[in-house]
Image (cartoon, rainbow, N blue to C red):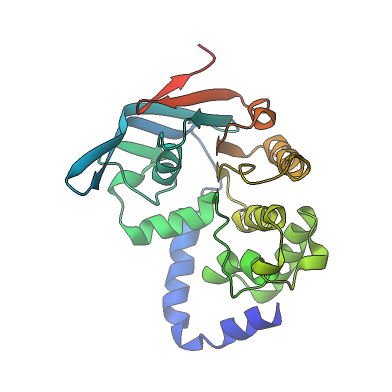
Amino acid sequence: MERLAETKASRKGEDPEKGQRKLRIEELKLTEKSHEEVILGSLLCKVYLAGDVEVEVLRGTNLIVEKGEFTVVSGASGSGKTTLLNIIGGIDKPTSGKVVVFGEDLSVEDEDFLAAFRCSNIGFVFQSYNLVSTLTVAENVGFPMEWIGRPVDHIEKRVQELIAMVGLSSRSEHFPFQLSGGEQQRVAFARALANNPPLLLVDEPTGNLDRKTSSKIIDMLQMLKDDGKTIVVATHDEGILKLADQKLCLEEGKLVNLDD
């Protein structure tokens, strides 16, 4: 973590801005969740333009996810699962409709608010991992904490805990290109948990992994479920489906409850 400390020290000229950012983060940190509905999506529509053609991915769909619930979203490739996760996470906005997460309507907020809100409340595990290629495992995991100005000693301790949790202590100084796909996925989980978010969004976590590695990811999801995290996973993996409290499928732009 020495390079992380050096990077932090080299940014002293940005301290006032970082201090304001940290204050904003703390204001948005949801330590007491009074409402059981963590996610409330209402009449969500998403339209993309492909040249002159409008592609309607989401067509007025609704979604409710309660606190501590493990929700699985399945559907054909290209059905809009990733789009839905991006909208829930405030990475993308619906063309119409609204999405309320922990009582905040993310569909109307600006990017500054959304970035701060995500950093404290939402962990995102991307299908393609999205690790920073020029950072080591430890630096990738520590980056979300460094971004909001956590003390270096806090970052170092938390990074060690998370890397140990995902079984990669011996790989902490390796770069992403030196890791297998399964190892990169585990680093992505550790990074998503850096700021201990209450909500985890996970996109096809076992899609590119072999059975043995997939089993490790499923065990990790089980552990996070037992820990009380609210989790939404886009997947077709039968092992993950067995963990689900709510099973949904995206069909023709709308969510269908598979338990009905």
Residue 145, given in percent of the width and then of the height, sits at 59, 66
Q: Quadrant of residue 202?
A: top right
Position in image of residue 173 (x %, y %): 74, 73
Name the residue at the top extreme: 260
Q: Residue furthest left?
A: 52
Residue 249 locus on image (x, y percent) = 48, 25
Q: Is residue 171 left or right of residue 42?
A: right
Q: Is residue 7 visible?
A: yes
In this rendering, would 236 be left or right of 45? right
> Which residue of the protein is positioned furthest toward the right in this rendering?
170
Task: Identify the residue at image location x=56%, y=37%.
Answer: 233
Q: Can residue 103 be seen from the camera position used here?
A: no
- In the image, 28 versus 194, the foreground residue is 194
171 or 39, nearer to the observer: 171
Q: Quadrant location of residue 219?
A: top right
Image vertical order of residue 87 relative to residue 10, above or below: above
Residue located 51% across and 85% down the image: 11
**Residue 197 in picture, x, y percent from top left:** 58, 50
Give the residue drawn at x 60%, y 54%: 192
Specify the quadrant that holds the N terminus: bottom right
Identified at 80% across, 55% down, the residue is: 167
Q: Is residue 235 left or right of residue 238?
A: left
Q: Is residue 86 left or right of residue 227?
A: left
Tag count: 0
